[in-house]
Image (cartoon, rainbow, N blue to C red):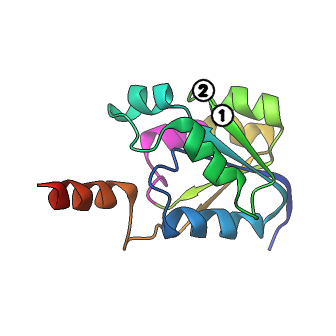
Amino acid sequence: MKKYKIGYIPGTFDLFHIGHLNLIRNARQYCDKLICAVSTDEVVESHKNKRPVIPFEERIEIVRAIRYVDEAVPQTNQDKYAQWKEYGFDAIFGGSDLLGTPKWLAYEAELKPEGVDFIYFEYTKTTSSTLITKVLKTLGE
């Protein structure tokens, strides 16, 4: 297993669940320092067209409290190149649901020449924030 100096995970981390924890725990094994970038409410609204259930300040505090996370930072835009310049990560982690998507292929094309590796972990299919939201809406009816 290759060890990276700084690993980076961007995410919404809304309705924090075992899939989020699996991603963070797995990533931590690959790096000396793990930075989790938590999307602000405005970023989530702009790229997912919905407001997160849990407000940003609460989501980032949850992520900060996880023992595998060395630093939790706000993600105020989707510009991974700017984030790389700011944080200097040499690996970026994500779920396998991102692998091969146009957005992530573009990130790879931009950052691989800078020496950044992309590592995708198996997506936890049994749970997701979207699934939890659907269940909560059904229970509320």
Q: Is residue 101 magenta?
A: yes
| Circles 1, 2 touching at the beta carbon (< 8 Å) | yes
- Image point 75% across, 57% down: which residue? 69
Residue 26 % position (x, y)? 67, 70
Q: Secondary structure at mark 2?
A: loop
In the image, which disc is placed on residue 76?
A: 2
Residue 128 lies left or right of residue 34; in this view the side is left
- Image point 32% across, 60% down: which residue? 132
Dot 1 corresponds to which residue? 74
Under mark 2, the amino acid is Thr
Q: Is residue 126 visible?
A: yes
Q: Quadrant of the C terminus?
A: bottom left
Name the outermost residue toward the left. 141
Q: Is residue 108 visible?
A: no
Determine the image quadrant of residue 87. top right
* Vertical arrangement, residue 92 with respect to residue 66, above or below: above
- Image point 54% across, 37% down: which residue? 56
